[in-house]
Image (spheres, rainbow, N blue to C red):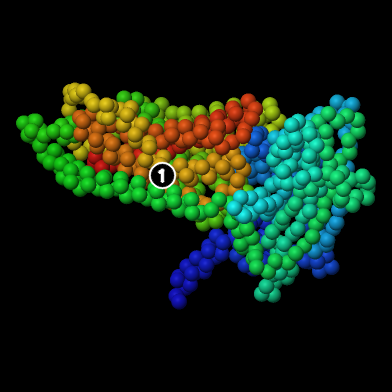
Amino acid sequence: ASPPSLLQAMVLRRLLIAAALLAAAPPPPAAAFYLPGLAPVNFCDADQEKPECKSAIELFVNRLDSVESVLPYEYTAFDFCQAEGKKRPSENLGQVLFGERIEPSPYRFTFKKKETCKTVCTKTYDTKKAEDKQKLDFLKKSMLLNYQHHWIVDNMPVTWCYDVEDGQRFCNPGFPIGCYITEDGHPKDACVINSEFHEKDTFYIFNHVDIKIYYHVVENGALGARLVAAKLEPKSYKHTHPDNPDCSGVPMDISNKASGEIKIAYTYSVSFEEEKNIRWASRWDYILESMPHTHIQWFSIMNSLVIVLFLSGMVAMIMLRTLHKDIARYNQMDSTEDAQEEFGWKLVHGDIFRPPRKGMLLSVFLGSGTQILIMTFVTLFFACLGFLSPANRGALMTCAVVLWVLLGTPAGYVAARFYKSFGGEKWKTNVLLTSFLCPGIVFADFFIMNLILWGEGSSAAIPFGTLVAILALWFCISVPLTFIGAYFGFKKNAIEHPVRTNQIPRQIPEQSFYTKPLPGIVMGGILPFGCIFIQLFFILNSIWSHQMYYMFGFLFLVFIILVITCSEATILLCYFHLCAEDYHWQWRSFLTSGFTAVYFLIYAIHYFFSKLQITGTASTILYFGYTMIMVLIFFLFTGKYIEPYFSILKLP
């Protein structure tokens, strides 16, 4: 092969290797090509330890969260065993925004060294002391709300696997702090796993974990082994001799009415097992395979494709049979006598490009929508290639924020071009609104939610320094880029319309119910929402139920289908409205597909009441506060499909 083709083959091969890797760790000094943070780590016995092969296995702890509360908390907020003197790893912007707080743990393992019932620490509480009582009450509250640990080994979640319905096995990347037996003897949450949990009005804390780490011996002459899975089983033991525990006996119970001194000893056991069938590149598969099956996803795709094919046929028929040919005829029309013989949309050709009311606001929305559209496309494209996999913690949000900041230029350009085509002259107001209106609303909502998180002491509260950094990205990078885009947009000549606009506006006849603005807009959002509502369920599950989302290929396909559906629904309904001689089409086009966001909001409300068990005023406010941010972004994203129709009307 010639040098260029050989180089292309090498680059393609390396990209395919990188896309297959689904875990992150510090890159070793190896000759193979790996993306930063996606290289494997080799482990070996303590007597064979070398710089490229280590024996110490570190266990990190992440925030604790619950499906019954939107408020996550750092590991250090609870009175668990702490790691002394160890520096916590740095977090990227996406991790901070999602409230992840990864910290070192006191759990220490050595590769292939089995440990049985090893003591970590013992915590003592005296209920007569206010400080101890407060710590114990916080621990009880967290068990009542089913807060879950999230542990990490070699950048893989330590999973708790258990049987569920239909003989299936679910691997949860977290395990509960403990559980509660109600006053009437009803076991809540994880208390159903052990028949010994039966005392009424009593908490049972999981103070012992049996950890099993699976490894795969590296082939092809490489040194050591690689970790491919880490599983645990939480247990509860009331250690009678905390200094010399035997991990047997009755469970560790804490009565809700207990008083005096309470001791909780934390222990663990660890074992290692070779796994020959799982390779390092596919070590996440056992977690992902236990997630909801993909046949539901394919049903969603087929449902969406049927809608797209139906709309495509309708739009193609209209374009081929009417629009393209008739617009050319009207450009050649000199007298009004011929026009009087026509009917429907052909009568309003002289008013079709009349500037809309509130053209300034519409152009600003279009600019912001363009920014969000490009950001979403590029983010999902990189996610499909594997660059933003679940192993790359926080990478998805970091990529989205950085892209939004860098895409200020297209937003300013599109807003300026449309505003100029509407005959606007206040270019300074236009560019300022494009830079600050929609981002300002999102930031204000986000800041209010952050104040609530600060007040609750949650780990999801964004530190002040990070808020300053986000503002710096907005004001110092995004705003100047928006001004640059607006400069080039206003510098270009105004968009030339293919038909002349009459000086006197035509009177709009009385409209039937179906051609009035509101019914048409309400109907317009149904089809796009029908394409995404199944995928929306999995996305909301990943956000609020803390389930792992990895099906970016499906999501990217649904994204493309949504873009096509919004465009075609807008074209179709606008054509029907123009046939009814209503030429106020610009805002109606924006709101037709943008109304999908209202259905999104209705679905989010339904999801809150039917699927979630969120309790507490703060959690409820946070849920709907963050939902409103998503609804606004989705409104701008879907509403901007006025542009395809605008392009069709410009056909010669």
What residue do we see at 67% from left, 45% from top?
91
Work out which quarter of the rendered image holds the N terminus and state it.
bottom left
Residue 620 pos. (x, y %): 60, 29
Residue under the point 45% across and 71% down: 5
Location of residue 43 with respect to 519 vertically, above or below: below
Residue visible at 54% across and 40% down? 540
- Specify whether 207 is left or right of 90: right
| Horizontal side, residue 432 vs residue 472: left or right | left
Can you see residue 39?
yes
Image label count: 1
**Residue 640 in sight in this render:** no
Image position of 511 (left or right of 172): left
Residue 35 vs residue 522, the one in the foreground: 522
Up/down of 36 relative to 189, above or below: below
- Mark 1, residue position: 531
Identify the secondary structure beneath mark 1: helix
Q: Position of residue 290 (x, y in %)?
A: 60, 54
The residue at the point 62 percent across, 33 percent down is: 614
Depth order, front residue of 263/610 = 610
Q: Amino acid at mark 1?
A: Cys
Give residue 514's position: percent from left, percent from top.
27, 30
Position of residue 36 in the picture relative to residue 404 (left or right): right
Point out residue 631 in the picture as x, y percentages from the top left corner. Answer: 48, 34
